[in-house]
Image (cartoon, helix red, strand yellow):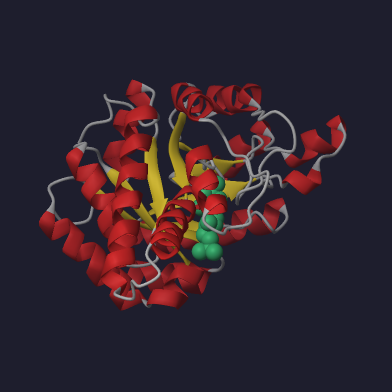
Protein backbone atom coordinates (compact mmCIF):
# COMPACT_ATOMS: atom_id res chain seq x y z
CA UNK A 1 0.00 0.00 0.00
CA UNK A 2 1.44 3.46 -0.90
CA UNK A 3 2.14 6.01 1.84
CA UNK A 4 -1.04 7.66 3.15
CA UNK A 5 -1.76 10.91 4.98
CA UNK A 6 -3.02 10.74 8.57
CA UNK A 7 -6.46 12.11 7.61
CA UNK A 8 -8.45 8.89 7.65
CA UNK A 9 -6.64 7.25 10.54
CA UNK A 10 -7.18 10.36 12.69
CA UNK A 11 -10.87 10.53 11.78
CA UNK A 12 -11.36 7.00 13.00
CA UNK A 13 -9.17 7.56 16.06
CA UNK A 14 -11.24 10.61 17.05
CA UNK A 15 -14.50 8.75 16.58
CA UNK A 16 -13.31 5.75 18.59
CA UNK A 17 -11.31 7.70 21.20
CA UNK A 18 -7.83 6.30 20.85
CA UNK A 19 -4.48 7.63 19.66
CA UNK A 20 -2.24 6.51 16.81
CA UNK A 21 1.41 5.80 17.66
CA UNK A 22 3.98 8.04 15.97
CA UNK A 23 7.48 6.63 16.22
CA UNK A 24 10.74 8.40 15.39
CA UNK A 25 12.95 6.72 12.79
CA UNK A 26 16.67 7.16 12.17
CA UNK A 27 17.88 3.97 10.50
CA UNK A 28 16.84 0.72 8.84
CA UNK A 29 16.58 -1.41 11.98
CA UNK A 30 14.29 1.11 13.68
CA UNK A 31 12.02 1.31 10.62
CA UNK A 32 11.88 -2.46 10.25
CA UNK A 33 11.25 -3.04 13.96
CA UNK A 34 8.37 -0.54 14.10
CA UNK A 35 6.75 -1.66 10.87
CA UNK A 36 6.91 -5.36 11.64
CA UNK A 37 5.26 -4.70 15.04
CA UNK A 38 2.51 -2.58 13.47
CA UNK A 39 1.98 -5.15 10.70
CA UNK A 40 1.60 -7.99 13.22
CA UNK A 41 -0.90 -5.91 15.18
CA UNK A 42 -2.63 -4.86 11.94
CA UNK A 43 -2.35 -1.29 13.16
CA UNK A 44 -1.84 1.92 11.20
CA UNK A 45 1.38 3.69 12.10
CA UNK A 46 3.12 7.04 11.70
CA UNK A 47 6.85 6.99 11.00
CA UNK A 48 8.38 10.36 11.72
CA UNK A 49 11.81 11.79 10.98
CA UNK A 50 13.20 14.89 12.65
CA UNK A 51 15.47 17.25 10.74
CA UNK A 52 18.43 15.76 12.62
CA UNK A 53 17.32 12.27 11.57
CA UNK A 54 17.19 13.52 7.98
CA UNK A 55 20.65 15.03 8.37
CA UNK A 56 21.90 11.72 9.77
CA UNK A 57 20.36 9.32 7.24
CA UNK A 58 19.62 11.56 4.23
CA UNK A 59 16.21 12.23 2.61
CA UNK A 60 16.63 9.58 -0.03
CA UNK A 61 17.71 6.79 2.28
CA UNK A 62 14.89 7.47 4.73
CA UNK A 63 12.28 7.81 2.02
CA UNK A 64 13.37 4.71 0.13
CA UNK A 65 13.55 2.60 3.29
CA UNK A 66 10.05 3.70 4.27
CA UNK A 67 8.82 3.02 0.74
CA UNK A 68 10.32 -0.46 1.03
CA UNK A 69 8.30 -0.93 4.22
CA UNK A 70 5.10 0.10 2.42
CA UNK A 71 5.79 -2.46 -0.30
CA UNK A 72 6.18 -5.27 2.20
CA UNK A 73 3.08 -4.59 4.30
CA UNK A 74 -0.57 -3.80 3.89
CA UNK A 75 -0.99 -1.43 6.81
CA UNK A 76 -1.48 2.33 6.35
CA UNK A 77 1.85 4.11 6.92
CA UNK A 78 2.37 7.87 7.15
CA UNK A 79 5.79 9.45 6.62
CA UNK A 80 5.87 12.61 8.72
CA UNK A 81 8.45 15.36 9.31
CA UNK A 82 8.80 15.79 13.08
CA UNK A 83 9.49 19.31 14.43
CA UNK A 84 10.05 20.99 11.06
CA UNK A 85 12.11 24.05 12.03
CA UNK A 86 11.31 26.27 9.04
CA UNK A 87 9.38 26.57 5.77
CA UNK A 88 12.32 25.35 3.66
CA UNK A 89 12.64 22.03 5.52
CA UNK A 90 8.88 21.44 5.28
CA UNK A 91 8.94 22.26 1.57
CA UNK A 92 11.86 19.90 0.95
CA UNK A 93 10.04 17.05 2.70
CA UNK A 94 6.78 17.74 0.84
CA UNK A 95 8.65 17.84 -2.48
CA UNK A 96 10.49 14.62 -1.60
CA UNK A 97 7.26 12.67 -0.94
CA UNK A 98 6.53 12.92 2.80
CA UNK A 99 2.75 12.74 3.34
CA UNK A 100 2.69 14.85 6.49
CA UNK A 101 4.85 17.61 7.97
CA UNK A 102 5.05 19.37 11.29
CA UNK A 103 5.94 23.03 11.35
CA UNK A 104 7.12 23.78 14.87
CA UNK A 105 6.64 27.51 15.36
CA UNK A 106 6.24 27.17 19.13
CA UNK A 107 9.48 29.09 19.67
CA UNK A 108 7.96 32.17 18.02
CA UNK A 109 5.33 34.52 19.36
CA UNK A 110 1.69 33.83 18.46
CA UNK A 111 1.50 36.05 15.35
CA UNK A 112 4.78 34.78 13.90
CA UNK A 113 3.74 31.19 14.57
CA UNK A 114 0.41 31.82 12.78
CA UNK A 115 2.14 33.38 9.75
CA UNK A 116 4.76 30.64 9.41
CA UNK A 117 2.25 27.83 9.92
CA UNK A 118 -0.17 29.33 7.39
CA UNK A 119 2.61 29.53 4.79
CA UNK A 120 3.42 25.83 5.28
CA UNK A 121 -0.29 24.87 5.26
CA UNK A 122 -0.87 26.69 1.95
CA UNK A 123 2.09 24.95 0.31
CA UNK A 124 1.26 21.52 1.77
CA UNK A 125 -2.47 21.52 1.05
CA UNK A 126 -1.95 22.38 -2.60
CA UNK A 127 0.07 19.17 -2.80
CA UNK A 128 -2.19 16.88 -0.75
CA UNK A 129 0.06 16.88 2.32
CA UNK A 130 -1.25 17.42 5.87
CA UNK A 131 0.28 19.73 8.48
CA UNK A 132 0.75 19.42 12.24
CA UNK A 133 1.47 22.65 14.11
CA UNK A 134 2.31 23.41 17.73
CA UNK A 135 1.21 25.98 20.22
CA UNK A 136 2.45 26.17 23.82
CA UNK A 137 5.84 25.24 25.25
CA UNK A 138 6.67 21.70 26.27
CA UNK A 139 7.85 21.53 29.86
CA UNK A 140 11.25 20.34 31.00
CA UNK A 141 11.75 18.75 34.39
CA UNK A 142 14.14 21.54 35.24
CA UNK A 143 11.34 24.03 34.63
CA UNK A 144 9.41 23.14 37.81
CA UNK A 145 7.89 26.54 38.55
CA UNK A 146 5.01 28.06 40.50
CA UNK A 147 1.40 27.57 39.44
CA UNK A 148 0.80 30.84 37.58
CA UNK A 149 4.05 30.54 35.62
CA UNK A 150 3.12 26.92 35.01
CA UNK A 151 -0.23 27.94 33.52
CA UNK A 152 1.45 30.41 31.19
CA UNK A 153 3.54 27.62 29.73
CA UNK A 154 0.68 25.25 28.99
CA UNK A 155 -1.40 25.67 25.85
CA UNK A 156 -4.13 28.28 26.20
CA UNK A 157 -7.36 26.73 24.80
CA UNK A 158 -8.66 30.06 23.43
CA UNK A 159 -5.37 30.66 21.62
CA UNK A 160 -5.45 27.08 20.32
CA UNK A 161 -8.90 27.72 18.82
CA UNK A 162 -7.86 30.99 17.17
CA UNK A 163 -4.63 29.40 15.91
CA UNK A 164 -6.42 26.55 14.16
CA UNK A 165 -9.03 28.89 12.62
CA UNK A 166 -6.37 31.21 11.26
CA UNK A 167 -3.84 28.65 10.02
CA UNK A 168 -6.05 25.79 8.79
CA UNK A 169 -3.55 23.29 10.23
CA UNK A 170 -4.76 19.68 10.19
CA UNK A 171 -3.62 18.69 13.69
CA UNK A 172 -2.29 20.52 16.72
CA UNK A 173 0.40 19.65 19.26
CA UNK A 174 -0.39 21.06 22.69
CA UNK A 175 1.53 21.40 25.96
CA UNK A 176 -0.15 19.68 28.92
CA UNK A 177 2.88 18.70 30.98
CA UNK A 178 4.93 16.29 28.88
CA UNK A 179 8.51 17.00 27.82
CA UNK A 180 11.04 15.47 25.47
CA UNK A 181 13.74 13.07 26.64
CA UNK A 182 14.17 10.67 29.55
CA UNK A 183 13.59 13.11 32.42
CA UNK A 184 10.00 14.27 32.33
CA UNK A 185 8.94 14.58 35.96
CA UNK A 186 10.87 15.19 39.16
CA UNK A 187 7.94 14.00 41.31
CA UNK A 188 4.74 12.14 40.44
CA UNK A 189 3.89 12.17 36.72
CA UNK A 190 1.13 14.72 36.16
CA UNK A 191 -0.70 15.75 33.00
CA UNK A 192 -3.19 18.63 32.69
CA UNK A 193 -6.12 16.63 31.35
CA UNK A 194 -8.33 19.63 32.19
CA UNK A 195 -6.51 21.70 29.56
CA UNK A 196 -6.78 18.87 27.04
CA UNK A 197 -10.53 18.70 27.67
CA UNK A 198 -10.95 22.45 27.24
CA UNK A 199 -8.99 22.36 23.98
CA UNK A 200 -11.13 19.45 22.76
CA UNK A 201 -14.36 21.29 23.66
CA UNK A 202 -13.27 24.16 21.46
CA UNK A 203 -11.75 22.01 18.72
CA UNK A 204 -13.76 18.77 18.66
CA UNK A 205 -12.76 17.96 15.07
CA UNK A 206 -9.04 18.75 15.29
CA UNK A 207 -6.72 15.83 16.04
CA UNK A 208 -4.59 16.72 19.07
CA UNK A 209 -0.96 15.59 19.33
CA UNK A 210 1.06 14.73 22.42
CA UNK A 211 4.82 15.15 22.12
CA UNK A 212 7.33 13.99 24.71
CA UNK A 213 5.14 10.99 25.46
CA UNK A 214 7.59 8.17 26.03
CA UNK A 215 7.03 6.03 29.09
CA UNK A 216 10.76 5.68 29.75
CA UNK A 217 9.99 1.99 30.15
CA UNK A 218 11.45 0.92 33.54
CA UNK A 219 12.64 -2.50 32.31
CA UNK A 220 14.59 -0.90 29.44
CA UNK A 221 16.07 1.73 31.71
CA UNK A 222 17.14 -0.94 34.17
CA UNK A 223 18.69 -3.00 31.36
CA UNK A 224 20.64 0.02 30.06
CA UNK A 225 21.96 0.79 33.51
CA UNK A 226 22.72 -2.86 34.34
CA UNK A 227 24.94 -3.21 31.28
CA UNK A 228 27.03 -0.12 31.77
CA UNK A 229 24.65 2.76 31.06
CA UNK A 230 24.33 5.77 33.30
CA UNK A 231 20.77 7.11 33.09
CA UNK A 232 19.73 7.35 36.74
CA UNK A 233 16.30 8.45 37.94
CA UNK A 234 14.72 8.88 34.52
CA UNK A 235 10.92 8.89 34.41
CA UNK A 236 8.26 9.19 31.71
CA UNK A 237 4.52 9.04 31.17
CA UNK A 238 3.01 5.71 32.29
CA UNK A 239 0.97 3.77 29.71
CA UNK A 240 -2.31 4.24 31.65
CA UNK A 241 -1.89 8.01 31.49
CA UNK A 242 -1.26 7.87 27.74
CA UNK A 243 -4.31 5.66 27.29
CA UNK A 244 -6.41 8.17 29.20
CA UNK A 245 -5.07 11.00 27.02
CA UNK A 246 -6.17 8.99 23.97
CA UNK A 247 -9.63 8.49 25.45
CA UNK A 248 -9.91 12.23 26.14
CA UNK A 249 -9.08 13.24 22.59
CA UNK A 250 -5.36 12.95 21.86
CA UNK A 251 -5.10 11.37 18.39
CA UNK A 252 -1.32 11.09 17.95
CA UNK A 253 1.24 10.12 20.59
CA UNK A 254 4.95 10.64 19.83
CA UNK A 255 7.53 8.12 20.98
CA UNK A 256 11.26 8.41 20.46
CA UNK A 257 13.04 8.05 23.81
CA UNK A 258 11.60 4.56 24.43
CA UNK A 259 13.02 3.41 21.08
CA UNK A 260 16.42 4.88 21.92
CA UNK A 261 16.37 3.01 25.21
CA UNK A 262 15.27 -0.23 23.51
CA UNK A 263 18.06 -0.05 20.98
CA UNK A 264 20.73 0.94 23.48
CA UNK A 265 19.71 -1.59 26.14
CA UNK A 266 19.79 -4.50 23.72
CA UNK A 267 23.13 -3.56 22.17
CA UNK A 268 24.70 -2.99 25.59
CA UNK A 269 23.51 -6.43 26.68
CA UNK A 270 25.01 -8.17 23.62
CA UNK A 271 28.34 -6.42 24.12
CA UNK A 272 28.43 -7.06 27.87
CA UNK A 273 27.56 -10.75 27.55
CA UNK A 274 29.44 -11.50 24.33
CA UNK A 275 32.69 -9.53 24.19
CA UNK A 276 33.77 -11.66 21.23
CA UNK A 277 30.91 -10.37 19.03
CA UNK A 278 31.86 -7.90 16.33
CA UNK A 279 29.34 -8.70 13.60
CA UNK A 280 26.97 -5.67 13.43
CA UNK A 281 24.13 -7.96 12.33
CA UNK A 282 24.30 -9.67 15.72
CA UNK A 283 23.78 -6.56 17.83
CA UNK A 284 21.73 -4.55 15.33
CA UNK A 285 19.55 -7.63 14.88
CA UNK A 286 18.94 -7.80 18.65
CA UNK A 287 18.18 -4.07 18.65
CA UNK A 288 15.64 -4.53 15.86
CA UNK A 289 13.91 -7.31 17.84
CA UNK A 290 13.79 -5.09 20.93
CA UNK A 291 12.34 -2.18 18.92
CA UNK A 292 9.67 -4.52 17.55
CA UNK A 293 8.84 -5.84 21.00
CA UNK A 294 8.65 -2.33 22.47
CA UNK A 295 6.35 -1.02 19.72
CA UNK A 296 4.15 -4.11 19.86
CA UNK A 297 3.64 -3.67 23.62
CA UNK A 298 2.87 0.02 23.09
CA UNK A 299 0.27 -0.77 20.44
CA UNK A 300 -1.36 -3.37 22.69
CA UNK A 301 -1.27 -1.34 25.91
CA UNK A 302 -1.80 2.22 24.72
CA UNK A 303 -2.96 2.44 21.15
CA UNK A 304 -5.45 -0.33 21.99
CA UNK A 305 -6.88 -3.33 20.27
CA UNK A 306 -9.60 -1.36 18.48
CA UNK A 307 -6.79 0.55 16.78
CA UNK A 308 -6.88 -1.56 13.64
CA UNK A 309 -5.96 -0.86 10.06
O1 LIG B 1 11.21 15.51 19.62
C1 LIG B 1 12.34 15.23 19.23
C2 LIG B 1 12.63 13.85 18.81
O2 LIG B 1 12.91 13.05 19.92
C3 LIG B 1 13.71 13.84 17.78
O3 LIG B 1 14.95 14.11 18.33
O4 LIG B 1 15.98 15.85 16.87
O5 LIG B 1 17.40 14.31 18.24
O6 LIG B 1 16.16 13.46 16.25
P1 LIG B 1 16.20 14.46 17.37
P1 LIG C 1 9.96 11.42 23.73
O1 LIG C 1 11.28 12.07 23.97
O2 LIG C 1 9.13 11.40 24.98
O3 LIG C 1 10.06 10.07 23.12
O4 LIG C 1 9.14 12.35 22.70
C1 LIG C 1 9.36 12.21 21.32
C2 LIG C 1 8.73 13.31 20.54
O5 LIG C 1 7.93 14.10 21.01
C3 LIG C 1 9.11 13.40 19.12
O6 LIG C 1 8.56 14.53 18.52
ZN1 LIG D 1 8.35 16.19 19.85
Q: Residue at x 12, y 47 (%)?
A: 74
Q: Can the viewer see residue 118?
A: no
Which of the two residues, 11 or 120, is positioned nearer the viewer here? 11
13 sits to left or right of 178: left
94 sits to left or right of 241: left
28 sits to left or right of 148: left
Q: Residue at x 51, y 56 (%)?
A: 227
Which of the two residues, 87 or 253, is positioned nearer the viewer here? 253
Which of the two residues, 148 or 131, is positioned nearer the viewer here? 148
Q: Whole-percent x and y of residue 133?
A: 53, 50
When the figure is inspected, residue 170 is found, relative to residue 275, above or below; the finding is above
**Residue 266, quarter of the rendered image:** bottom left
When the figure is inspected, residue 59 is found, relative to residue 3, above or below; the finding is below
**Residue 141, quarter of the rendered image:** top right
Q: Whole-percent x and y of residue 84?
A: 51, 63
When the figure is inspected, residue 109 is found, relative to residue 170, above or below; the finding is below
Q: Whole-percent x and y of residue 101?
A: 42, 58
Q: Whole-percent x and y of residue 20?
A: 36, 38
The image quadrant where one finds the C terminus is: top left
Amino acid sequence: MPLVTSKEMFERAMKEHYAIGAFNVNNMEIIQGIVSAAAEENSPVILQASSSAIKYAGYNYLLKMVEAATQETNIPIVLHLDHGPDFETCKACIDAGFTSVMIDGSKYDFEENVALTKKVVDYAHERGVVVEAEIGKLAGVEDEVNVSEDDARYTNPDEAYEFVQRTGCDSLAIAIGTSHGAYKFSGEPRLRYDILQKVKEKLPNTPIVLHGASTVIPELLEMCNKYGGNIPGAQGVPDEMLKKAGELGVSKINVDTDLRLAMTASIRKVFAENPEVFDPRKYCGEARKMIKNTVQNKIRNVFCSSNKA
